[in-house]
Image (cartoon, rainbow, N blue to C red):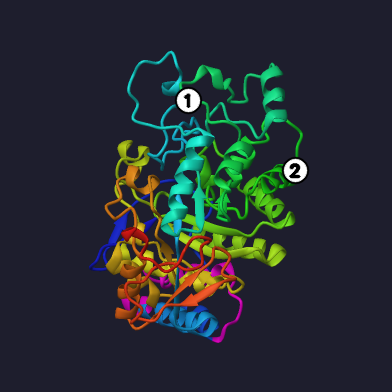
Amino acid sequence: MAGVSESGTNVPRSDFDFLHQPETDQSFANALEKARDGTRLSVADGIELLTTGTDTDGIDLDRKELVLEAADRRRAEVVGEEVTIVANLNNNVTTACNTGCLFCNFKDRSEQFLAENDGDHGGFTKTPEESRRVVADALELGIYEVTSVSGLHPAFALDDEHREILETSDRGDLNYKSPDRYDVDPGTYVEQMEAMSVGGVHLHSMTPEEAYHARRGTDWSYQEVYSRLKAAGLDSVPGTAAEILVDEVRDVICPGKIRSDEWVEAMEAAASVGLPMTATIMYGHVENEAHRVEHLRKIRDLQDRTGNITEFVPLSFIHQNTPLHDRGMVDGGATTHEDELMIAVSRLFLDNVDHIQSSWVKYGDTQGLKMLTCGADDFMGTILSEEITKRAGGDFGEYRSFQEYVDMITAVGRVPVERSTDYEQRRRIDADDTPAGPTLGPRADGTPLLDR
């Protein structure tokens, strides 16, 4: 795949011989006309818009602006001038993981967590009691959403029944060790859900990859897993672990993860038991534009079948400190032009998903605000802790106050709106209501989040 530098010149990034290539018999002009008219785009249309035309090398900056303009108009038609934010906490339970994803520097080899290991690995595992304290403390600050995405600790089981199955199994391929072998027992997934589901907080947790881990060694369906998790307090599912939903890319960057069809199967199961969900893409590594649009097609098809996706979140790959970079497989991430086009084409292609998020953790404040003119309408949340991007080498902050959001959003002429996780509750924040704080949480009274 070739990206572009800030001057528009080509920057080669991948030498992989993939089957999917960004080549079409469509024209950029036709694709742009369909995007402007609101006609449902084909994969070929998406590739033309994302590349700014397969008839030219690199990104044509004039054509790029036309795509951004079309996406910004579509955003205004769908959601108006509002920019939404949420008061949330990230509570990652453990960094112990053996999956071996080459794009990740969040995990630590789980062998380092064994009680017999005297070395200092710098990672962490929280007990259910510790998770409960973290969430309870954050509730006092006014948050109302807790997002929990964690490593696949070998001691994790879905519940006591699953633990018994794993303990008595003679299979050697289940990535399981008894919790008494570790310094810290993470408990079961159900125990962690029950611990974090306190005080009326909305619990957003259990990716498809974690759900796979929670059913290993059994014949349980994903519906069974998500039903038990929902009964334990789970309210919605983060659609991460998607990366790129094309298996030839997954074979390179995350060969130990579930396949793309199983990711989709798990998400459909979550929807079937009444759990709202988000969806993501992690781009800018070894994939090309054809992979990105094929990923968007699978998300759009999933939404056609379920209608449960509340927002789509493009995540630009942070390359520093990752095995992909350390091994010389990539020399950088996506360019700014690619980032803007990814947001814009997501808005235009996903005609059945209302909300597109701009991640200031990935893009920074200035570029994150620019994405609000490229088709995005959600600006993340307070994320009182953020470990994953930081460990990968991200330079931007770990938390944000409501007042900072209000100042930034109003400065670009848009309307700040506090929202619930599922977008069902919304509160417009007037610029003169300062200092601003959350009000939608069970203990939120408008007090500035970080001033308590």
Residue under the image location 61 percent in, 42 percent down:
194
**Residue type at numbered disc 1:** Val
| Residue nearest the observer in this picture, 157 or 372 | 157
Circle 2 residues within 10 Å: few <14, some 14–19, many ≥20: some
Disc marking residue 233: none
Extreme residue in the top direction: 116
**Magenta segment: does it hold 415?**
no
Q: Amino acid at mark 2?
A: Glu
Say above or below: 411 vs 327.
below
Judging from the image, what secondary structure is the residue with disc 2 in? helix
**Image: 120 above or below 336:** above
What residue is disc 2 on?
224
In the image, what residue occupies the spot 34% across and 56% down? 399
10 Å neighbourhood of mark 1: few (<14), some, or many (≥20)? Answer: some
Task: Indicate the secondary structure of the residue bearing disc 1.
Answer: loop
The location of residue 33, given as percent across then percent down, is: 51, 84
Q: Nearer the viewer, residue 151 or 261?
A: 151
| First in residue order: circle 1 vs circle 2 | 1
According to the picture, the residue beneath numbered tag 1 turns out to be 184
User: At which x and y percent is residue 289?
Assistant: 46, 60
Q: Is residue 190 visible?
A: yes
- The foreground one among 14 and 373 is 373
Return the x and y of residue 117 as percentages of the image width and height. Answer: 40, 16
Q: Which residue appears at 65% of the width and 35% of the height? A: 158
Q: Residue furthest left?
A: 7
**Real-space Cα separation, disc 1 to disc 2, in angstroms:** 28 Å
Q: Which residues are magenta?
A: 37-64
Q: Position of residue 361 (x, y in %)?
A: 35, 57
* Quarter-of-image position of residue 277: bottom right
Q: Quadrant of the N terminus?
A: bottom left
Residue 46 included in the magenta stretch of the image: yes
Q: Residue at x 38, y 53 (%)?
A: 384
